[in-house]
Amino acid sequence: MIAGAGEQTDDAGLATRFRRDPERFVEVHDRYIHDIYRYAAGRLDAQTAEDIAAETFCVAFGLRDRFDPARGGLRPWLFGIATNLVARHRRKEARHYRALARTWTEPTVGSHEDRVVAAVAARRMQPQLARALTKLSQGERDVLLLVALGQLAYDEVAAALGISKGTVGSRLSRARRKLHDTLDQEAVNG
């Protein structure tokens, strides 16, 4: 879901309400917890993702008086907090990608044919993709994964990371090029 002007206006109203009555912050949680969890789960293991998602809302609650609707909506603000928390787990994240490059698990859904096709594709691509992700800078990986996993638009990524929209575009372009080059090199060497 891409945030529109209506959602930002709604976020501004929600911010006004939770400043007056902090118990209203539960509405922010209910509205965005699934998006934040899904993003964190794409970056980290499921348990850590739960922790990151919960911690994101704890941090946001503590900073709720600092939220400025003029700078963007609640969604990119929360994704910015989550990205900062993920950065604190950077070593764990790098270990996770290295482990993905070494391991593979059998898919458990779909027909036998689907599982065979998925297994072949996953076995072929997962280790190379995981290795390629480790070759990105933290900023490139953050932008790429906010777009790919968080499904944030460029302006939302910019607000989440506190960078310009142009920087988002250049980091994403570099990340895509690096991934493409690394995967091409893997195919030649593989």
Image: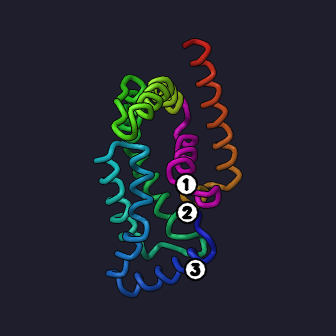
Please name the residue that numbered disc 2 is placed on: 1
The segment highlighted magenta reads 135-156
Which tag, 3 or 1, sits closer to the chain's start?
3
Q: Residues within 10 Å of mark 1 (few under 14, many from 20)?
A: some
The stretch drawn in magenta includes residue 147 = yes
Q: Quadrant of residue 157?
A: bottom right
The tag on residue 9 is 3
Residue sitting at 44 percent across and 24 percent down? 123
Which tag, 2 or 1, sits closer to the chain's start?
2
- Dots 2, 1 in contact, CB < 8 A: yes
Secondary structure predominantly adopted by residues drawn in magenta: helix
Residue that extends furthest to the top in the rendered view of this protein? 189
In this rendering, which labeled residue sits more in front, label 2 or label 3?
A: 2
Picture coordinates of residue 179 (x, y %)? 60, 31
Q: In what quadrant of the picture does the C terminus appear?
A: top right
Colouring of the image? rainbow
Q: How many marks?
A: 3
Q: CA distance from mark 2 to mark 3?
A: 16 Å
- Judge by depth and name the residue closer to the eye, 151 or 108: 108
Residue sitting at 62 percent across and 57 percent down? 153
- Dots 3, 1 in contact, CB < 8 A: no
The stretch drawn in magenta includes residue 145 = yes
Residue sitting at 43 percent across and 31 percent down? 113
